[in-house]
Image (spheres, grey):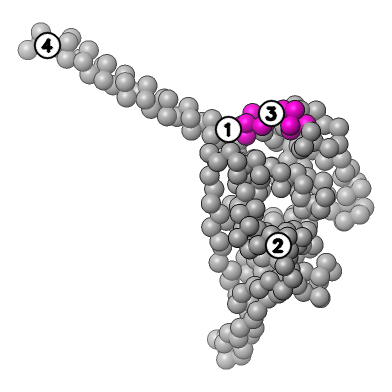
Amino acid sequence: MKKLSLALLVLFSSQLFAAGGAIELESARIDLDNKASLQRGAKYFVNYCLSCHSAKQLRYSRMAKDLEIPPELVELNLMFTGEKIFDGMTISMRPEDAVKWFGVNPPDLSLIARSRGSDWLYTYLKSFYVDASRPFGVDNALFPKVGMPHVLADLQGMQQAVYKDVELEDGSIRKVIDRLEIVEPGRMTEKEFDKAMNDLVNFMTYMGEPAKLERQRLGWKVLMFIFLMIVVFYFLKKEYWKDVH
């Protein structure tokens, strides 16, 4: 299985410009109540991210419970390196080996969605394009000079950048990226790939705050309790104060 490899560490950079042109972020449709989307996102995360990037803050058992996946299916389909169901989502690659092979230890992605935002992640994952001058043969329109191969190319295919001329304040002309076009189709259509990346980002958003759904469910119960108690206290107040007048 191809993996979303170490170079996703570039997500920690703050640069949001490509070839001199600002990139507009696309909106990810985050729906943490959509269990089917979260389950698909978990599959993509394990298959494309987890060999190089850990997510130690999330336990497999917690994921199984929240996403309503039977633990035996998690062990069969989402755990491959001898982990236990109550372990965090760690990787077998040793930090010293990662530094030796890649020059840096790939970061843990547990909180990347909270750090970067879901729209940033969604746009980033869709913005790779062919650039023969780069070490891996690709660049990223959202993050120029990205140090990452396009490991999702088998799904998306390969894109090329289409440029336009922009006149600068000094009168000079600069080429900036206008749009990206598919030049080599992948296994998915554009619509299917968009959905797959949305599922992946949806899962990574959940991963950054697994307790959010539980807090939301508890919040409604608390609000209902407060409302009912207000009604009770109102009639009690009327009963106790009726003889005062």
> Can you give x and y, in whole percent of width and height, for residue 59 in the image?
71, 32
Residue position marked by numbered label 3 in the rendering: 70
Residue position marked by numbered label 2 in the rendering: 156
Residue 79 located within the stretch drawn in magenta = no
Mark 3 residue element: loop
Q: Which of 148 and 63 is in front in this view?
A: 63
Q: How crowded is mark 3: few (under 14 residues within 10 Å), some or many (20 or more)?
A: few
Residue position marked by numbered label 1 in the rendering: 211
Name the N-terminal-most of marks 1 and 2: 2
Residue position marked by numbered label 4 in the rendering: 242
Q: Residue at x 73, y 60 (%)?
A: 187
Mark 2 residue element: helix
Q: Which residue is drawn at 62% across and 89% down?
A: 173
Give me the disc on residue 13: none
- Tell me the quadrant of the picture where the C terminus can be found: top left
Name the N-terminal-most of marks 4 and 3: 3
Residue 86 as seen in the image, left or right of residue 229: right
Name the N-terminal-most of marks 1 and 4: 1
Q: What stretch is highlighted in magenta?
A: 64-75
Residue 73 located within the stretch drawn in magenta = yes
Rounded to the nearest whole Å, what is the CA distance between mark 2 and mark 4?
73 Å
Q: Which of 174 and 30 is in front in this view?
A: 30
Rounded to the nearest whole Å, what is the CA distance between mark 3 and mark 1?
19 Å
Which amino acid type corresponds to the residue marked 3 in the rendered image?
Pro
Rounded to the nearest whole Å, what is the CA distance between mark 4 and mark 3?
58 Å
Q: Nearer the viewer, residue 127 or 36?
A: 36
> Can you give x and y, in whole percent of width and height, for residue 138 in the image?
77, 69
Which amino acid type corresponds to the residue marked 4 in the rendered image?
Lys
Which amino acid type corresponds to the residue marked 1 in the rendered image?
Ala
Question: Is residue 233 among what the camera can see?
Answer: yes
Rounded to the nearest whole Å, what is the CA distance between mark 1 and mark 2?
32 Å
Q: Residue at x 75, y 44 (%)?
A: 46
